[in-house]
Image: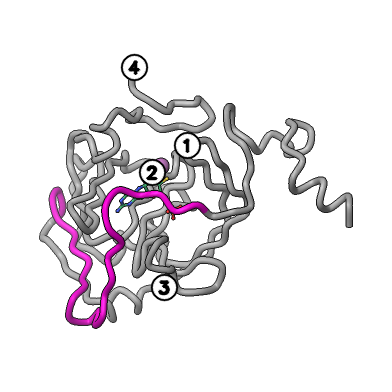
Amino acid sequence: MFDLFKRRYDTTPEGTHGRVPPGQYVTEKFPVLHYGDVPHYTNLEETWDLRVWGNIAEPKRFSFAEFRALPTIQVTMDIHCVTRWSKFDTTWEGVQFKEFLKHIPEIDSSAAFVIAHAEHNFTANIPLEFLMEDDAMLAYKYDGEELTPEHGYPLRLLVPKKYFWKSAKWLRGLEFLPHDKLGFWERYGYNNNADPWKEERYSS
Ligand SMILES: Nc1nc2c(c(=O)[nH]1)N[C@H]1C(S)=C(S)[C@@H](COP(=O)(O)O)O[C@H]1N2
Ligand SMILES: [Mo]
């Protein structure tokens, strides 16, 4: 028992087997962080959709039911927030980004970046190659349950290889672009590359 406990919460490099990026501490809590109000939805079929546009053959729109009919995967990842907390072994369910691409019109070969568009004009920019990783997904369940409003209900992006701010909550659109374009926190001074292992927190 004690040994198990120790293995989970001992955050020395030996205790975590190199799982804690530089400057991070491990928490068991799941803090809520965002700018603006939490959106609340009543009838998703009428008030919610997911739109895809930009560098693709033609724009596409998914209703809630259409999106929820897509095949799903489960991913267990460690969260690393730029405000220094890390949370281990969070389990999510949703549509793998790579899989999602099979259900939208063909993306142009020049597309290299994706802008995630969320409620209240929040945006996050991500290089397409990071979304092509096996663990990048459009998530709607956390720990086996529907996302809570605070954590992004009904849909959020998950980009496990980056600091958590790139994982846009309340996702409503994906825009494909040939060039990069800074998102909300990136314009605010966060480091555009956002690699927790390189401690790329802020832009200089
Ligand atoms: N739409 C939206 N998504 C967002 C943010 C935001 O301000 N708006 N903040 C980001 C930041 S800074 C963090 S750390 C994570 C926090 O996710 P959580 O509240 O589920 O822990 O959401 C990210 N996604
Ligand atoms: Mo954050």
Of the numbered discs 2 and 3, the one sitting upstream in the chain is 3
| Magenta stretch holds residue 133 | no
Q: Nearer the viewer, mark 2 or mark 3?
A: 2
Look at label 2 and name its amino acid: Trp
Residue marked by disc 3: 71
Magenta segment: 31-56
Q: Residues under labels 4 and 1: Cα distance? A: 17 Å
Element carrying mark 1: loop
Residue marked by disc 1: 83
Q: Residue furthest top?
A: 204
Q: Residue furthest left?
A: 58
The spot of residue 10 in percent (x, y) is 77, 40
Q: Nearer the viewer, mark 4 or mark 1?
A: 1
> Is 197 located above or below residue 110 in the figure?
above
Does the beta carbon of the residue at mark 2 sit less than 8 Å from ligand 1? yes
**Cβ atoms under marks 4 and 1 closer than 8 Å:** no
Of the numbered discs 4 and 1, the one sitting upstream in the chain is 1
Q: Nearer the viewer, mark 3 or mark 1?
A: 1
Q: Nearer the viewer, mark 3 or mark 4?
A: 4
Element carrying mark 3: loop
Look at label 1 and name its amino acid: Thr
